[in-house]
Image (cartoon, grey):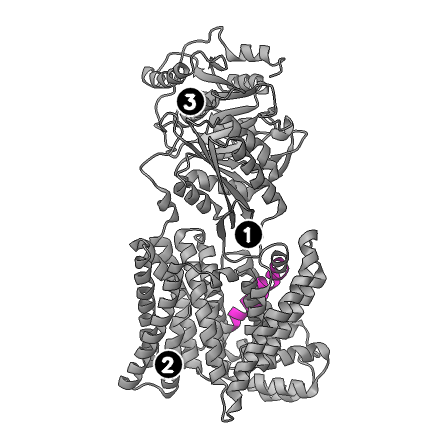
Amino acid sequence: MPGFTLKLAWCSTIYGDGMEMTKKVYSNEIMDVEDFNKGGIGSNLKKEKKQRKGRSPHEGLDDNYFPGIKLIGKLSQASWTTDLRFPDISTAGMIFGPTFLGQNKKLLDSMFPVRSLPTLWTVASFGNLFYIFLIAVKADPAMMLKPGRAAMYIGSSMFCMALVLSVALSFLLKSVVTMEANLNKSILFIAASQSFTGFPVVAAFLNELKIQNTEVGRLALTSAVFADLIDIIVAAISLTIGDVVSHPLVPVWAVLSNIALVAVVVFIIKPMVMWMVGPIKEMKLVGEKCIFITTAVTLLLAFVSEIVGQHYVLGPLIFGLVLPIGPPFGAALVSKLSTLVCGLLYPAYLAVTGLQTNIFEVDFQSAIIVGIVVIFGIIIKMGAVILPALHSQVPVRDAFVLGIILNIKGIVEINVYNFWKDNKTLQDGDYTLCIVSVILTNVVVAPLVKLLYNPSMQYNTLKRSTIQHAKPDSELRMLVCIHNRENVPTIMNLLEISHATEESPIAVIGLMLVKIEGRAAPILIANSQKGVPETESSSTASIFNALRSYEQNHRNSSTVQSFTSITHFETMHDDICRLAMNKRATIVIMPFHKKWAIDGSIESTNRSVQQMNRNVLKNAPCSVGILVDRGILNGSLSVLNCRLLFNVAVLFFGGPDDAESLAYGARMVRHECVKITIVNFLLFGNANSKERKRDSDLINEYRQSSSGNQKFMYFEEVVRDGVELAGCLTKMVGCFDLILVGKYHQKSPLFIGLEEWNECPELGVIGDMLASPDFECAASVLVIQQPRMRVSETEPLIHDAPDDNSVCVSMERRNQRTF
């Protein structure tokens, strides 16, 4: 058991010379090194063994004896800071191994001296151990215990069919083809490995392609989890059977010891951990002591797994699954260990895997046979995925992409092949073929999925879901996204002034956006009326209570549904857009990525939220509003509790986005506490009659529908250039609590010079100006975009000279008043 000897080497390094222990380590490990290194480092093996006999592996060594480890460290650092993936690191290991550069004996001996190999192997094994442990910590056991029906069908089908048919093919090849003796013994195992589908591999692959939040991504994750559960059970049984010897009591002992291991972890260690974590939930702080104890227990369980005859990752795997998922404990554990494990130890394991391969040990006939088995396994698995997926009403294209995704290979297969190599089930040539097949599969699958699957296409719709094009008095369906409690007051005011009535109700879909921490699979959950999930914080509960309070205040005119999205900001827009499409949302409200301080300065900026907002604007199937919340500057007064009017301005420059803002403002003016001011900005000069008539007709339509309403005011402001426009906006913004403006506008001399200073393109030129901290504005701003963003590029609109009915003049008079 190589894992056992590695742990002994590690123990001897820490606790002393350990003469007998070190002798065993060297006698066992150097044999493995010879097998791995037929290109040349074995020449100094015996001499080095005599020199090092009876001494600690690290005694007398300096940094010059670890050039290979340094090289892997640099490669690992590159993998942590760039987009290097599993195939890149493993291929780099192959390049430095006997396959390429290792053919030069002097170079290989200088890069990987014999005395550095025990340390290198130990680092690699720890990387494998803790990587699997972290994957288990981030995994959600509920996905294993309660998979969907489609996931059960797909997971069980692809495992069983791939296993049975691939093994059947191997028996057929053994009977018809004369093959090498080693391959004849291992072909059965290679065929069986084609049925593996590792959840960690699928999760990492989907995260790399940023599609884990799509329908295909979620189905792939749940199917892989269920298939992985079957894999673990079958693998544990196989290892138990493999350890059977002549004594009849050994199988009984093996089964009982495995059951005892699981029972101890679940019924003894888990309660102790939960007792330790209890105070952490209230304090929200995980101490170093808890991390140290958890790490020590992980190593102990790896040691126990070897003793009971299992692979050393089994104990850490089970232990990781029973630990609390997500914050505070799971997130802190992942945060503390990820940098070391994913940045150094795990890439070292992949590099060492590549170092063990030797392409010169492969003969052509064996390569053809293994290639046939691998390709056959891929085809069978695709068929085993596509058929049940189609039966579960998955579209044909998505089912095909799902089949490709679930053929991805990685750490699970690598672990199996390394284990078989250590047990002499796979010889060097067969092992190399297996590793190369894993690398080639990864190289092919990723580009195929990128080529065939574009998640944004699912949000395309021929029907525009906008406020402007909705039927009069139809239901307004608002998807409001919330990051924290600071977003709530202004959003509640926005919901209130949107004016829900029995004739024109409002359906509110509240979506809490939570950055994923300590979790592998993203989730989108519907929150029940009885309360929020256990994973949610008390602040989240108060947010949803505020939404339910709004529903109770408008019992007959509004409905509220609440959801929580826990995922990466890079893919959170998929949840938002899909929910908007499924719930037929009319408009999505997104908080701006900047947070204001009470003195009017910028308190914090979140670039991840900014990119998420841009992705939503790009892909949303309905209108989108970016809400610049300045409620803290005016006290965040509630419309319900305030006796004064809530003043809203609509800035109109022309175009579909301004038309959407106008339509939304026309709905707000029906509220008894809302006063709307429409400001139509015109360019000084002669008019382009066609464009002006279209805008005038649109404005007149809303003016006519609000005729007789004293709270609906309309002004035309004629300006010559951007300087006059900025001056006019400066004079008027102090009179309003909320300003509505469209994002895109037609090209006009009004915007010349302003576009060059645009810091936030997602707000457009005017929205960016109003959101700037240099622009003295205490009003909140809602920048609206219709789903069709492209507008015709016509000549700029030109209008007559200004008259006395100037909004700037009126606003200067109103600035001294209180509304």
Look at the picture and state if 552 lies above or below 168.
above
Whether residue 644 sits left or right of residue 17 in the image: it is left
Look at the picture and state if 397 lies above or below 92.
above
The tag earlier along the polypeptide, 3 or 1, is 1
Q: Amino acid at mark 2?
A: Leu
Tell me which residue sits at (54%, 66%) in the image.
347
Q: Quadrant of the C terminus?
A: top right
- Residue 686 lies, in percent from the top left, at 37, 12
Decide whether the magenta segment is chiefly helix, strand or loop. helix
Q: Residue furthest front?
A: 556
In the rendered image, residue 343 lying in the magenta stretch gets the answer yes
Give the magenta range.
334-352
Q: Which residue is mark 2?
A: 188
Q: Quadrant of residue 219?
A: bottom left
Q: Which residue is mark 3?
A: 748
Q: Amino acid at mark 1?
A: Ile
- Residue 56 lies, in percent from the top left, at 69, 81
